[in-house]
Amino acid sequence: MADLYRLVFVDSWAWWVGGVIIGALVPLMYYFTNTALGVSTGYGSIVKKIVPGSKLRWLNTKAVTTRPDWRLYFIVGMIGGAFVSARLSGMPWVTQSMGIFTSSVNWGFATLAFWFLCGGFLLGIGARIAGGCTSGHSIHGLSNLHMSSVVATAFFLFCGYLSTRFITLVFFK
Amino acid sequence: MNKMIRYLLIGLIFGFTLSRVGASDFDLLHLMFRGVNLKIAWVIVTAIVTSFIGMRVLAMAGNRTYDGEKVKVSKKKLSWRNNVIGGVLFGIGWGMTGACPGTVLAQVGEGKLLGIISMSGMLLGTYVYAWLVERNEWMEG
């Protein structure tokens, strides 16, 4: 029993286990909700909650004004799922660490926060202009053979590679 | 079952799996881009193949949902300008934060403070997008 618990809840899963489950979510989500798997538009739903009175046109388009807004339930589920995973595997409740990044750079928390805020900013604005993110384009879009997802994913990966390379060269000694 | 509960459950499985397989781990993503450890690349490839097969099975089974509706696959039109510019900005952010919009949420659930900061940055980016798209209609794909 203890071994089984370790295998499922403590040890990191094999790549194919995670890949099969994540991939199966696309047809399952269509089957149960008739909705395309996607995360990034949900950030618009949260923004809409923060500034409900905004007159900006995009914040009043169908994507973020659907009621009830399924994207909020989906997001709460995702955060909750990762929370359960972290609790069962014995991760610390809260941590300032971000793996090799925080152990390689010698920055204070304010500098780190500024870096991750800028990175998140680019993710948010980039996903909206590209019309999707890793889940909507790279998993949902590619598996449905959409050309726009091929182009977007190629640039996600290419620039992800470049920025990682830059970070490694400049900040990691 | 209430449809919103279904979304919540699918989200739960997604977040749990991202965390269990290590997709929300900065190091694994960083090492993938450096070509040192390709685990996350294999997760993504396996997910694409599984989804492709699953969508074919769903089509062969009549393309009907659990509620009996016809499955409507949402498709985004190709726009080089949008997909390239958005892709470049997103890619840089991906490398900087070691996360994408989905795994940022997983990091938040895991209690990573810098993940919460990345999420705040994403909300800010989305708001600025809403503001920019007002004057630059091409940005809407």
Image (cartoon, rainbow, N blue to C red):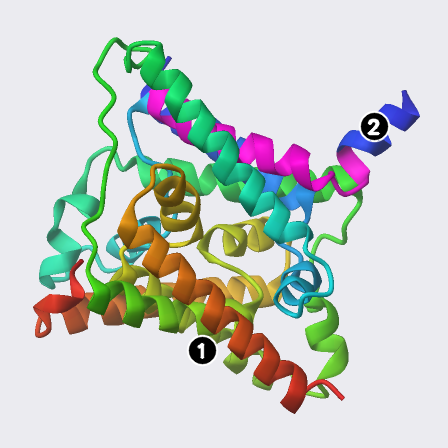
Q: Disc 1 designates what residue? A: A118
- Which amino acid type corresponds to the residue marked 2 in the rendered image? Tyr
* Residue visible at 8% across and 74% down in the picture: B135
State the extent of the magenta-drawn residues as a range. A9-32
Q: Reading the chain from its start, which is encountered first: label 1 or label 2?
A: 2
In the rendered structure, the answer to whether residue B107 lies left or right of residue A72 reads right
Quarter where residue B67 is shown: top left
Q: Looking at the picture, does residue B21 appear above or below residue B138?
A: above
Residue A88: where, in percent of width, then height? 75, 37
* Residue visible at 81% across and 40% down in the picture: A11
In the rendered structure, the answer to whether residue A52 lies left or right of residue B35 reads left
User: Distance between the Cα atoms at labels 1 and 2?
Assistant: 39 Å
Instruction: Check disc 2 and report its element: helix, strand or loop.
Output: helix
Callouts 1 and 2 on one subunit = yes
Instruction: Check disc 1 and report its element: helix, strand or loop.
Output: helix
Residue B58: where, in percent of width, then height? 37, 17
Please tell me the numbered disc located at residue B88: none
* Front in this rendered view, residue A172 or A54: A172
Q: Looking at the picture, does residue A6 appear above or below residue B40?
A: above
Q: Chain of mark 1?
A: A
In the rendered structure, the answer to whether residue A12 lies left or right of residue B83 reads right
Q: Disc 2 designates what residue? A: A5
